Image: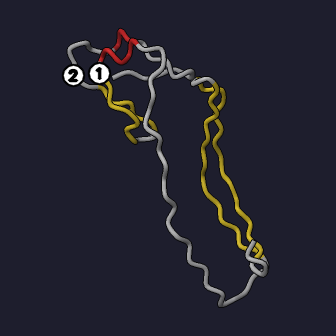
């Protein structure tokens, strides 16, 4: 087991060469399965994670002017296959109940 630093780099000496496969885990989800030789590459591509958001049902029993939907987000910006920036936080979508925009 090894942990990466803030730049995503892992100390390769902390890995056992005789271990057959390694899993890269981020946010408790596997994003790649690698062999020891994969760690000699300069860039390792990981699996994209796309999460579907469950449908939100809004009843119009008590009409309101605005509907607010709030949730967590994270985003990565890459350039030339290199991570340039990362952002995460809480986003709020505001919908006008009358115009539905």
Q: Is residue 46 left or right of residue 63?
A: left
Position above or below: 64 against 75: below
Which residue is label 2 attached to? Answer: 20
Q: Is residue 74 left or right of residue 63?
A: left
Q: How is the image coloured?
A: secondary structure
Image quadrant where one finds the C terminus: bottom right
Instruction: For label 1, count other residues whose C-alpha is less than 10 Å away and answer few (under 14), some (14-19) or many (20+).
Output: some
Q: Is residue 6 left or right of residue 23?
A: right
Number of the label disc, if any, that sits on residue 84: none
- Image coordinates of residue 86 in percent, x first then y, are 63, 34
| Residue pictured at 32% horizontal, 25% vertical | 34
- Image coordinates of residue 38 in percent, x first then y, are 35, 18
Number of the label disc, if any, that sits on residue 35: 1
Position above or below: 78 against 72: above
Indicate the secondary structure of the residue bearing disc 1. Answer: loop
| Residue pictured at 61% horizontal, 36% vertical | 76
First along the sequence among labels 2 and 1: 2
Position above or below: 57 against 32: below
Pointers 2 and 1 in contact (C-beta within 8 Å): yes
| Residue pictured at 39% horizontal, 11% vertical | 40
- Image coordinates of residue 53 in percent, x first then y, are 52, 61
Instruction: For label 2, count other residues whose C-alpha is less than 10 Å away and answer few (under 14), some (14-19) or many (20+).
Output: few
Image quadrant where one finds the N terminus: top left
| Residue at the bottom extreme, as displayed | 61
| Residue at the top extreme, as displayed | 13
Indicate the secondary structure of the residue bearing disc 2. Answer: loop
Q: Residue 31's image quarter?
A: top left
Q: How many marks?
A: 2
Q: Residue 64's image quarter?
A: bottom right
């Amino acid at each position: 087991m090894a942990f990466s630093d803030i730049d995503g780099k892992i100390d390769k000496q902390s890995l056992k060469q005789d271990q057959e496969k390694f899993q890269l885990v981020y946010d408790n989800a596997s994003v790649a399965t690698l062999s020891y030789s994969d760690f000699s590459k300069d860039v390792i591509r990981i699996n994209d994670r796309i999460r579907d958001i469950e449908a939100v049902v809004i009843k119009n029993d008590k009409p309101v002017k605005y509907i607010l939907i709030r949730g967590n987000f994270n985003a990565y910006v890459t350039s030339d296959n290199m991570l340039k920036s990362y952002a995460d936080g809480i986003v709020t979508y505001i919908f006008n109940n009358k115009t539905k925009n």
